[in-house]
Each structure stands twice: as structure tokens, then as C-alpha cells.
Amino acid sequence: MRVLIVGSPYIASYKIGIEQPFRELQRHGVCHYKVRQDFEADKGDVAAADVILFFRTVHPGAYNLLREAKNMGKKTVYVIDDYFLAMSPGSESGQFYHDPMRREVYTRFIREADMVKVASDYFARHLEQHYRPRRVVSFTGSVDFQMLDRLERPEKRDGRIYIGYEGGRKESAFEPVIQALRGVARTYGNRVKIEFFGYIPDGLEDMHQVTFAQYDPDYRNFLRRLYQSNWDIGLAPLDETLLHHCKTNNKYREYAACDIAGIYADTPPYQGWVKHGVNGLLVRAQSKAWYEAICELIEHPRLRQQIREHAHVHAREHFTIAACAKRWREEILQDQK
């Protein structure tokens, strides 16, 4: 089967959601895939393919290719992992996606593609309710466990509890966590170390227990550093907005794969995956709740270990590249229009 992927191949969600499973599928002879950015793909690329995936694009030229593909009888799939129209119109990204032309292209892709592929059941239900696409399929991205299994993890020798976050800027989501971490630092002093990779919330830079390292845009390096950090506790706050409710379970996937006991926002991206007290802790957006959850994992090493073990087994079952590739093959590539 020949697959044309139209969209940017340079962002992390492409690497973990498409590139990893499609390399696996190509290696096993299921398909051959080709990637073209939305401004360079043409009618000839469409004619040479059996299935066309449009990845996160809102480019009018890409929509024209959707129409061409449908006229040729090709199967079309719109792959999105963000609800662009839930972004604040005042933000930089929101201004881009709320442009009337791009809004129209986005909604037309959702309604007219043969299938819409998302990474969140909540997002899938929202699209079904408000846009009535022809069909929606939901499953998450993958983790390259083979890469992780080749890495060595340094031993912690100082006896401290390591707490961390690696990821992008989440100012409002971290508001209740800042106060909680300040309380943890006062309570436990040098027994804890708090590390931030990529983003550090304002108000924590002055704490002697806190360190910061810059963001690495290479996702494989991102995951390597997370695995080798050997954190005891990983933090995953998230805003309680429609945009963030439609997000996928990235942090759970990453923390579970890297043997980190995670504390997660009690919101839709994590509620379907995290069983409180078993493979993670779920907390509401309150400083007291975050403080108590962090303290619980500090005070109970056996609970930390149980959460790490359960989450890791769960991740190996659901998030391997092979498992993700199987979902693509069975639910999209072999499905009839």
C-alpha cells in the first residue's frame, strides 16, 4: 500500500504519532510511505498513492489536494492532535488558526475526509458531537522502547528524592504547583531536588533545590534525557480548558515508559489512563492537593515503586511502536472506505 503524508515532518507529534509506527509498517512490508510538506505536495503525489494522510495542515493548497484525492477515489485521513479552534484568539497560535480562511479549511478537512484520526477519546467525542465527521478513530502515539532499553541510567548516590518536569511552557497550569513545591522545599529541605527541563515556572528560580536545563527540540534527545534523569516523581499539571481536555496523554506515556511515578492533573487526557494510586496519582488544580500528593510519594517509597512498576507494564502493553503500528494497520490502512 502506498501512503502519502502531507504535513510537517519536523514536529514531535509527527515523530511519535506517525513516523515511528510507519517506519515499522514499512519495515514489515505493510506499506511504503512518502512525506511531503503541505506547500510542496502536488496532484502527481496524490495520484501515485492509495491513502493520503493530511497531518495537522490548514493550508488551502492541501485542502485542494483533498478534493483531488476524493475525485480520484483515494482514501483520505485527516490526522490532528490539537483542537486548533479552542486556542485563545489572542495567542500567537490562536491568531494563526482563527484566521477565517484557516478556520474554514480546518472544519472542511474534519467534515470531508473519509476519516479523522485523533489521539484522545474526549477529542473524538467532541468532534463527533459538533462536526459530524464521516468517521473518527482515536489512539495514542508510541514510545521507542528499543532506544530506551539500550540506554544506561546513572544511579542516584545522594539519597535525595528527585522531582521533575520536562516539557513546554505551562504558566497557568503550574500556578497551584508552584506553591506546592515551595511547601515541599520548606518541609523536606535538602532531602529533595527539583529539576526542570525546558521550562521553569516563575517564582522557583531562587530555590536552592531547583535546577533548570534548556529545552531540546530533538524528541529522541528529549526522551533520552527524561529516562536518564532517573526521577522519583514526575509532575504533569494541565489547564482545565477545552483545548487541554482534547490533548493526548503525552506525560503519562513518557513518565510510565521512563519508570517515573507520575502525578497528573485530574483531567480527561489522563483520567482514562491513570488509575489513582495504582499507576499514578490524579489531583485537582489546587495547591493543597498537589502538596499532599507530592508528600505522599515522598513519604511512601513502596507506593512510588508500585506506581512505577504498574505504569511501566501498562506502557509496554499499550505504547510500543509495534502496538501503535498495529492500530494504524487494522483501523485505518486496512479499513474500507
Image (cartoon, rainbow, N blue to C red):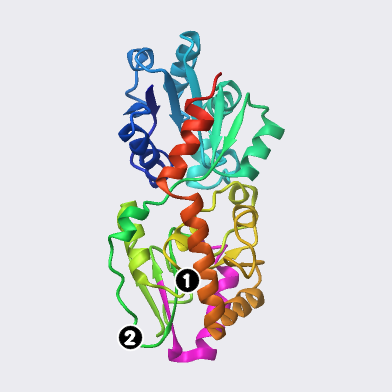
Q: Is residue 187 magenta?
A: yes
The x, y position of residue 152, in whole percent, is 28, 68
Find out whether the residues at labels 2 and 1 contact each other: C-beta distance under 8 Å.
Answer: no
212 lies above or below 38:
below
Amino acid carrying label 1: it is: Asp
Q: Where does the N terminus fall, quadrant-wise?
A: top left
Q: Which residue is mark 2?
A: 157
Q: Is residue 320 left or right of residue 139?
A: left
Give residue 271's quadrant in the image.
Answer: bottom right
- Residue farthest toward the top in the current orientation of the protein: 71
Mark 2 element type: loop
3 lies above or below 286:
above
Circle on res. 202:
1
The x, y position of residue 99, in whole percent, is 53, 32
Circle on res. 35:
none
56 lies above or below 173:
above
Crowding at label 2, few (<14), some or many (≥20) Cα neighbours within 10 Å? Answer: few
272 lies above or below 27:
below
Which residues, given as a range, are shown in magenta?
Answer: 170-195
Amino acid carrying label 2: it is: Arg
